[in-house]
Image (cartoon, rainbow, N blue to C red):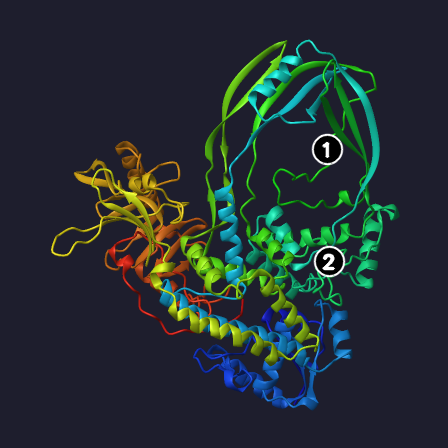
Amino acid sequence: MIKNLVIVESPAKAKTIEGYLGKDFIVKSSFGHVRDLPKDNNAIDIQNGFKPTYVINSDKKEVISQLKKLAKEAEVVWLASDEDREGEAISWHLAEALNLNEAKTRRIVFREITKNAILNAIENPRTIDVNLVNAQQARRVLDRLVGFELSPVLWKKIKTGLSAGRVQSVAVRLVVEREREIERHKAESAFKVVAQFDAGGKRLEAELNTRFKTREEAEDFLRRCIGAAFTIESLEKKPTKRTPAPPFTTSTLQQEASRKLYFSVAQTMTVAQRLYEAGKISYMRTDSVNLSQDAMTAAAAEIARSFGDNYVKTRQYKTKSKQAQEAHESIRPTDFAATLVSDDRNEQRLYDLIRKRAIASQMADAEIEKTTATISISGQPERLIATGEVVRFEGFLKVYSESTDDEELADDDVKGMLPPLSEGQALQLQRLQATQRFSRPAPRYTEASLVKKLEEMGIGRPSTYAPTISTIQKRGYVEKDNREGKERPYQVLTLEKDQITAQQKTEMAGAEKAKLFPTDIAMVVTDFLVSHFESVIDYSFTARVEEEFDEIASGKKQWDKMIDTFYSSFHKTIESSANVERSTVSGARELGVDPVSGMKVIAKLGRFGPYVQLGEEVEGTDAKPAYASLRKGQFLESITLEQALELFKLPRVVGEYEGKDMKAAIGRFGPYIQHNSKFYSLPKDLDPLLVTEQEAVALIEAKRKADAEKLIKSFPENPDVQVLNGRFGPYIVVGKKNVKIPKGQEPAELTLEQCLDLAEKTPDKPARGGFKKKAATADTPAAAKKGPAKKAAAKKGTTTKPATKKKSS
């Protein structure tokens, strides 16, 4: 007979908890959700209060069978899933699937996996919170209704395989609108003037308090400064304080981990999950900046021990978001004294970030003295300003300084101090320089800054940010990419030794790193949804829906009535969309006429992505149009006739090698050279329109050399088996399976039999991250394939049967 059965979501969590409970407790894992809506259209009974039908996931039937057996034997069953709506829903589904007796079932929650927290939860059990379950159920049902009814409309009107989602489509709209804002931006220039002085043997830099719009104005100012005297007119010293940022919420952790550690949003959550399950940090899905009194006391003790009592200043932060659940805690270490918690580099780096931020939040303000020197120019009205800062007391800066998304404002450290100065002091001008600077558009979103924007707008919740960001990329609406800047000339005017010189220099403008770019399909779909389903992707509407979920969670609103109000108007819009002509939403544009052939040039969206078409089929003739894929960074709505005509120059014969042509072209994975039925990707610095014969030959030979060095051994009698050199050393490939070579075994001496034997002993592993690749889902079907446009691009695809996804967006 089992005395106590504890059920959690993950095996790692189970292992940690089992270490804290005695022999009277058995801890088992449900491996996440155990039930979900079925994949067919019968999942929700719309006519009867939107009643959902749930089925046990096929991969969880064995788990449920084992848990049922254990639950029958147990005196008490403790449901210990996470303390949020998703966790509450998992406990409810477990209770239903296992047919648990309410009298012997306990629900326990904790914000951290520590011995005290677990034992305290056991001492204070509760029942399943049906309001929280209904809030999660409302989200799941609403998102299923939107996905199941709206996605097929996109398939019919635009392209097979597209998807729409209540949150994902709003996120895509933000990225699309930002891209268009950038496209509309017209850079304006102004001249920034910076002076360099000798101040008693020390260098002093100052900036003019105004900018000049034209070169003539800047040059006139420099001319007026020839022979002028520069004097310290005034010195102002002002004490200021800097206050630490609050501890992390889910979104601020994602943002800071992106800026400081270069983690993606999904990577941050995966690593944080491991730290939480190992008992090192508190729960990582939270919108609260609160710290418990115990945590504040522990932080203060660690600060006093490490730095002294004068560094301690405990604070209780107030969350700005009205939806935040203040009863929850921010993300913090479970033991403030613990510094080394993992051998995994990324886990340790993220833990350091969390610990330092939480500790800094309870430290004294940084005391800074800011000095502003105003410099007069004899006979001129303008003034130069020099500023510097001196840290009088480090306070929290000793541990942590928050970074920013704005590259121009990024300033993790205080400014340097000024040299000794005094009012009336004469300064010796070394150089006065006016540099042309250009206005910049709003920056493209990073994953983290998009999360920040969604949070500011009240769209989504801590549990949905990462899945949303991942979904819009998986579905082919948004690409995370680096883009090279374009060379831009700028002017520099310099006054030195009473002589003015002018230079024209160049800079790379508009370079982007790990930014989110919309695809053409994102633009077409967003325009269609805005035109015909404005309410679904309206920013304020989506935020209001989130508020309604919160009201359901607090018992103030009935979930089925909330769904009914939404669905009645939504379904009418779906029905009315049947009258929309497909041709009006294709994104197709006639660009003009080719001056050489006199044929029309049209930009279209095809099965394999955006492309341009030269000419049209003419019945009764052999006339066939030519097709060319758009290049990265080109969009249907903005590509010009000139740019389109350039695309038709590909594929082009670059030259000949070994008696066969080398052709440059652009494919679904970018530009390449084709030679002898093999393909060689072109690096970023080689343009397919400009690449030379010599460069193409060098590329082919370099690839052959790399391939030869990669191959250690092959077996002619079985071509599926090879011994190769990889990034992490030699390994065996058997078919699609990678096999590790045992230590002490010389890779070049392996026989075919040994390779096959090692492969047989190596189990098939799921994809990295522990999850097998999922099939396309209903509310978010598979992304459209990308590739070279061809005639098939214009053909209709086959409508596929919808299926569901595991989690809602």
Report the residue marked by disc 2: 320
Callout 1: few (<14), some (14-19), or many (20+) C-alpha neighbours within 10 Å? Answer: few
Task: Work out whether residue 133 can be spotted.
Answer: yes
Residue 443 rendering spot, x and y as whole percentages: 55, 44
Q: Is mark 1 on a helix, strand or loop?
A: loop
The amino acid type of the residue labelled 2 equals Lys
Query: Is residue 3 positioned above or below 724 on the image?
Result: below
Work out whether mark 1 precedes mark 2 in sequence or the reverse, and give the earlier one: 2
243 with respect to 610 (left or right): right
Instruction: Give whichever of 222, 745 is nearer the camera.
Output: 222
Query: Is residue 558 positioned above or below 376 on the image?
Result: below
Q: Residue lying furthest right in this view?
A: 309
State the residue at coordinates (62%, 52%): 255
State the residue at coordinates (44%, 56%): 522
Q: What element carries label 2?
A: loop
Q: Which quadrant is the C terminus positioned in?
A: bottom right
Q: Which of marks 1 and 2 is in front?
A: 2
Q: How far apart are marks 1 and 2 (CA)?
A: 30 Å
The amino acid type of the residue labelled 1 equals Lys
Callout 2: few (<14), some (14-19), or many (20+) C-alpha neighbours within 10 Å? Answer: few
State the residue at coordinates (42%, 69%): 577
Report the residue marked by disc 1: 415
Residue 723 rendering spot, x and y as whole percentages: 35, 53
Q: Residue 645 falls in which quadrant of the image?
A: top left
Query: Is residue 585 positioned above or below 683 on the image?
Result: below
798 with respect to 162 (left or right): left
Residue 632 rendering spot, x and y as whole percentages: 39, 46
Q: Residue 452 falls in which quadrant of the image?
A: bottom right
State the residue at coordinates (51%, 85%): 47
Query: Mark on residue 45?
Result: none
Q: Residue lying furthest left in this view?
A: 620
Task: Work out whether residue 460 can be spotted.
Answer: no
